[in-house]
Amino acid sequence: MLIRIDHIGIAVDDLDAAIALYEQNFGMALVHREIAEGPGLELVLLEIGESHIELLTPVRDDAMISGFLAEHGPGLHHVAYVTRDIEDEMARLVGEGMRLIDTEPRTGIRGSRIAFLEPDGTGHVLTELVEPAPSV
Ligand code: CO
């Protein structure tokens, strides 16, 4: 089952400006920053209660969100939910007739295990499942 919102993903084209907005104007603490070589992204987590805002920006032209930014510009990109056992939740959702973009969990931010659902089945909201790393 889905437990709570892990993060809201926001695509940005100016990471420093976005960090300034969330840190200074909204008063959120920057708690994590990493380069994800696979999808070609720089990722930042800012804390809001038990949840986070995840800023995503491309670090190369063929990054995972380059097409999204070219088409839509910066803005809301995805919502991510915590689950305790991602394989169980993926199987349950497939049993509900939903389709997965990731048929196997892959490594996400902060060593989490993640999988995205096919947005055709989620009202065109890109939806991510997150099984946090045990230490987080
Ligand atoms: Co995410």
Image (cartoon, grey):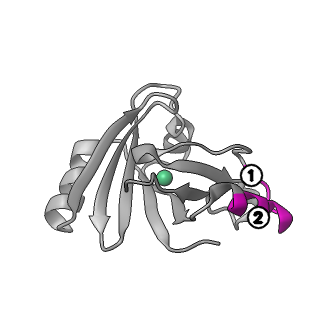
Q: Are marks 1 and 2 in contact (CB under 8 Å)?
A: yes
**Percent of width and height locating residue 118:** 72, 54
Q: For label 2, count other residues whose C-alpha is less than 10 Å away and answer few (under 14), some (14-19) or many (20+).
A: some
Q: Is residue 18 visible?
A: no
Identity of the residue drawn at 70% across and 67% down: 123
Question: Quadrant of the rendered structure where residue 54 is?
Answer: bottom left
Identity of the residue drawn at 52% across and 33% down: 39
| Between discs 1 and 2, the one toward the N terminus | 2
Helix, strand or loop at mark 2: helix
Identity of the residue drawn at 21% across and 65% down: 28
Name above or below for residue 111 compared with residue 62.
below
Helix, strand or loop at mark 1: loop
Q: In the picture provided, is 22 more to the left or to the right than 72?
A: left
| Main secondary structure of the magenta stretch | helix
The part of the chain drawn in magenta is: 88-100
Residue 90 is one of the magenta-drawn residues: yes
Q: For label 1, count other residues whose C-alpha is less than 10 Å away and answer few (under 14), some (14-19) or many (20+).
A: some
Residue annotated with mark 1: 100
